[in-house]
Image (spheres, rainbow, N blue to C red):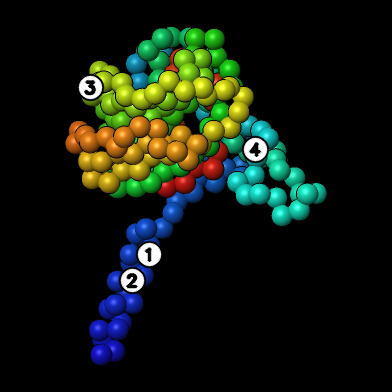
Amino acid sequence: MRSLLFWMVALSAAATLSAAEKTFDFSQLKEGQTPSGFRSAVGGGGKPGEWRIVLDEVPSLMQPMTLQAPSVSKRPVLAQVAQDPTDEHFPLFIYEEEVFGDFTLTTRFKTVAGSAERMAGIAFRLQDETNYYVLRASSLGNTFRFYKVVNGERGTIIGPEVPIPSGVWHELGIECKGNKIRCFLNGKEAFPTLTDSSFTKGKVAFWTKSDSVSYFTDTRI
């Protein structure tokens, strides 16, 4: 009986660890630093982006406890600040330390600047710079779209037209279970569940396009 109880506890602990949430915590980094554990890369033409920490005002995730408590605070966030106007230019900041199969990811993002584009997104189940899924928001195009890239070729683009104001923090969410993919914008499912078996696991990466200057924070998997 004790042996059975031991194994039940051990299995429960293992399941808890496997389901543990990973947070990309930039709060201890200084302005101008580049977070470790990531690799800057690029899909399409041009050079890799410039990813570094900047300070920005971010609304609290929770309601203030009192009226006197601040609802926003200035803190370190991840930024892509290079402004390469090349059209088919996709800076990627790839997390190299883990591969993800089934997962739920949320991140806050803000598009800040860009004349050609103002986009921010997450590439996921990424194999390399030419093979991945991406969910991205466009403030200039007022669109929230999913597509896959296979051998550098973009697949069918799926998603609605929706206002995504620049200079405002939004939340993007992705849920992957097997070949089912769900996509969320500001806590609401953006379009019906997708089914695609091209990639079953891979890395995740922050993603932008062309001359987009975009910020990211509060990223959890």
Q: Quadrant of the N terminus?
A: bottom left
Displayed quadrant of residue 201? top left
Using the image, tell me which numbered label, if any, was put on residue 16: 1
Which of these two is toward me, 60 or 126? 60
Using the image, tell me which numbered label, if any, was put on residue 151: 3
Give the CA separation, mark 3 to mark 1. 36 Å
Counting other residues with Cα less than 10 Å from the Cα at mark 3, is it few (<14), some (14-19), or many (20 or more)?
few
Residue under pointer 2: 12
Q: With 42 as the anchor, is 151 left or right in this view?
A: left
Residue under pointer 4: 58
Give the CA separation, mark 4 to mark 1. 31 Å
- Disc 1 marks a residue whose amino acid type is Thr
- Disc 4 marks a residue whose amino acid type is Val
Outermost residue to the bottom: 1
Q: Are marks 4 and 1 in contact (CB under 8 Å)?
A: no
Give the CA separation, mark 4 to mark 2. 37 Å
Rendering coords of residue 118 (x, y %): 51, 18
- Disc 2 marks a residue whose amino acid type is Ser
Q: Secondary structure at mark 1?
A: helix
Q: Earlier in the sequence, mark 3 or mark 1?
A: 1
Q: Are marks 2 and 1 in contact (CB under 8 Å)?
A: yes
Which of these two is toward me, 212 or 168? 168
Q: Earlier in the sequence, mark 2 or mark 3?
A: 2
Which of these two is toward me, 127 or 171? 171
Q: Secondary structure at mark 2?
A: helix
- Disc 3 marks a residue whose amino acid type is Asn
Give the CA separation, mark 2 to mark 3. 41 Å
Q: Of circles 4 and 3, which is in front?
A: 4
Give the CA separation, mark 2 to mark 1. 6 Å
